[in-house]
Image (tube, helix red, strand yellow):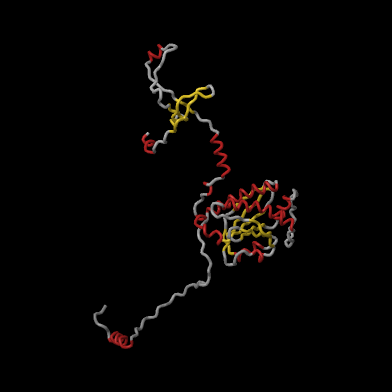
Amino acid sequence: MPATLSPEEVKALMSAIQDGKVATEGARGHRGPVANYDLTSQDRIIRGQMPTLDAINEQIAQQLALGLTGRTRLAIRASSAAATLLKFADLTPLLAPPAAVCVLGLGGGYGFGLAVLEPGVAEQLLAAALGDRRSRQPDAVPDARRELTAVEQGVLKRLLGVFTDAIASAWEQVMPFKPEPLRFELDPRMASIAPPSDVGIVSAFELTGGLDGRLQLVIPYAAVEPAKQRLAAPRRLSQRGDDRVARMMAREIEQVKVDVRGLLGATRITLSRLLELEQGEVLLLDRDECAPLPISVQGRLKLLGSPSVAGGAMAMKVERALAAPSPAALLSR
């Protein structure tokens, strides 16, 4: 770099000092793709998986299969798929006829949900519930515009009661839902339970065996948003178990027989003395006359008592229980 400026550079420097403007070389601009963004949009950003929600759906599927099998006397199996998130505006094709849509009340101020029976499922459930065991003909096509009669709606509501009971039981540890079937809708617009921009959780349950089809559950994301952290946590529902199973196991454990022994005393003698023992001889034990006797359960000392007689038989009267050993004492063994 030269130490002195050229006449052109001096002239440009003086001009910049007087005018306050500095001429720069134009740089080539880079024009990339433009993404439109609506600052007025209030769409929620929902990321991550919800393993607890998948565990809940598995429980619903198990209880749904058992309930429908009991109501229809058909060997129905149900399996759940991974839940998906959709805007309610995108749910219109799912709700369009000939699907049967039932509006569910979630109870407790949680709003409403939807139970969607895909074409043919409602007819199969009605036929099974009303005693028709004939299989549907391959070319049988349900009437897409036929409205359900009052009797059919009543029967379907009772069958969907099995579904809502399964929902309430599976969600009990996460959200206290109390769902119940309210009404059936043929018009998707009348089945709108949330604004089109809101997000809904869609859970699908595949029915096989006695009937084939899909039953889908739609719950607004706003209803479960307070428990989103628990839904995103690792699966822990299996730790809760079934209360009936726990009670049954408790009853079985209570009936287990254990070995209880009362030790009157002990002594040590030589082998020669043992060989010389005769009938009527007395052995002195290492326990005082009034000292409590130890009572062991399955070989472990648990109680202290005293000898007694009950019902013409020798017995042990329990006086007190021994304190459990400290963890330090257990580790030192």
Report whether residue 36 is seen. Answer: no
* Residue 85 position within the rendered picture, expressed as x and y whole percent measured from the top left: 56, 60
Between 140 and 316, the one nearer to me in the picture: 316
Q: For the point 44% across and 33% down, which residue is it?
A: 321
Q: How many marks?
A: 0
User: Is 30 located above or below residue 280 in the figure?
Assistant: below
User: Is 87 located above or below residue 172 in the figure?
Assistant: below
* Residue 148 position within the rendered picture, expressed as x and y whole percent measured from the top left: 73, 59
User: Is 26 located above or below residue 66 in the figure?
Assistant: below
* Residue 125 position within the rendered picture, expressed as x and y whole percent measured from the top left: 70, 52
Q: Quadrant of the C terminus?
A: top left
Q: For the point 62% across and 57% down, which residue is it?
A: 217
Horizontal relation, residue 126 to residue 269: left or right: right
Between 329 and 302, the one nearer to me in the picture: 302
Q: Quadrant of residue 20?
A: bottom left
User: Is 262 located above or below residue 233 in the figure?
Assistant: above
Q: Quadrant of the N terminus?
A: bottom left
* Residue 39 position within the rendered picture, expressed as x and y whole percent measured from the top left: 50, 72
Horizontal relation, residue 28 to residue 166: left or right: left
Q: Quadrant of residue 285?
A: top left
Report whether residue 26 is seen. Answer: yes
